[in-house]
Image (tube, grey):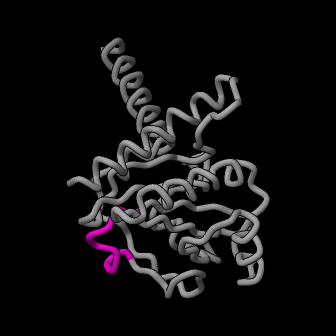
C-alpha cells in the first residue's frame, strides 16, 4: 500500500511539473478564442478589438522599452508585416510598461518610433490585456509573449517570450534557435493565410 501511495505521489508531482512546463510554453492557450483587447490608447490605427479583426491572421506581440529581446524581435515584426500584410496579416504591437502603471502615451510613441513600428501599436498600461491573454504570469516566465490568431479568432500559435528573428550573420546556437522560432511563426502565418 505504501508503495502504491508513493507511486501516486510521484505521478501527481510529475503531472504538476508538466502542467507548469505547459504554462511556460503556452500550450494551454492553443485553440482558445482570442480574449478581448479593449485598449484605449494606440498609434497608427483607431483602437483595435479582436472581433473587428475577423478574416485576418493576427500576430500580437507584447513588448516594452528597455527590453533587449523586444529590440531584437522588432525587425522580424516589421518584416512579417511587410511580407504578409497585403495577404491578410495584421501585426499588432502591445506596449506594456514595466512596472505596470508607469506609462505615458508619449513614452509608448517614442519607444515605437525607435523600433520603427508603423503597424498598429496599443498601450496595455496596467497589463489587463496581458493578464487575459497570458494568465498566471508568475508561472509563465516572460511577458514579451507573441500570439498568432487565425481568421476565425482562435489562438493557433504561442511564442512564450524572449526573441525571435532571422539569425543573419550571428552564428551562435542561441540565435539559431531564434531563427528556428521565427521560421515556425512564418510557416504558421503562411499556412493560416491559405485557410
Q: Position of residue 61 (x, y in %)?
A: 54, 60
Quadrant for the C terminus, please.
bottom left
**Residue at 49% over, 61% down:** 81
In the image, is residue 64 part of the stretch drawn in magenta? no
| 123 relative position to 24: left or right | right
Q: Nearer the viewer, residue 170 or 14?
A: 170
Tag count:
0
**Residue at 45% over, 63% down:** 133
Q: Quadrant of residue 168?
A: top right
In the image, is residue 51 part of the stretch drawn in magenta? yes
**Residue at 46% over, 38% down:** 183
Q: Position of residue 190 (x, y in %)?
A: 33, 49
Asked if 117 appears above or below 68 in the picture, the reply is: below
Q: Nearer the viewer, residue 19 or 41?
A: 41
**Residue at 62% over, 44% down:** 163
Q: Nearer the viewer, residue 134 or 19?
A: 134
Residue with the most extreme left position: 195
Q: Position of residue 167 (x, y in %)?
A: 63, 34
Q: Quadrant of residue 86?
A: bottom left
Residue with the most extreme top position: 3
Magenta residues (range): 50-58
Amino acid at each position: 500500500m505504501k508503495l502504491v501511495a508513493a507511486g501516486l505521489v510521484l505521478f501527481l508531482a510529475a503531472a504538476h511539473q508538466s502542467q507548469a512546463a505547459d504554462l511556460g510554453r503556452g500550450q494551454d492557450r492553443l485553440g482558445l478564442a482570442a480574449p478581448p483587447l479593449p485598449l484605449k490608447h494606440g498609434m497608427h490605427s483607431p483602437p483595435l478589438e479582436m472581433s473587428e479583426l475577423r478574416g485576418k491572421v493576427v500576430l500580437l506581440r507584447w513588448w516594452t522599452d528597455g527590453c533587449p529581446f523586444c529590440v531584437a524581435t522588432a525587425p522580424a515584426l516589421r518584416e512579417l508585416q511587410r511580407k504578409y500584410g497585403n495577404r491578410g496579416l495584421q501585426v499588432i504591437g502591445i506596449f506594456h510598461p514595466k512596472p505596470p502603471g508607469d506609462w505615458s502615451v508619449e513614452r509608448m510613441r517614442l519607444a515605437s518610433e525607435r523600433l520603427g513600428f508603423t503597424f498598429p501599436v496599443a498601450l496595455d498600461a496596467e497589463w489587463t490585456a496581458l493578464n487575459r491573454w497570458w494568465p498566471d504570469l508568475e508561472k509563465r516566465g516572460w511577458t514579451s509573449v507573441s500570439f498568432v490568431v487565425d481568421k476565425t479568432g482562435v489562438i493557433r500559435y504561442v511564442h512564450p517570450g524572449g526573441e525571435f528573428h532571422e539569425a543573419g550573420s550571428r552564428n551562435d546556437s542561441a540565435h539559431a534557435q531564434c531563427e528556428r522560432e521565427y521560421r515556425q511563426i512564418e510557416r504558421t502565418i503562411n499556412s493560416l493565410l491559405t485557410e
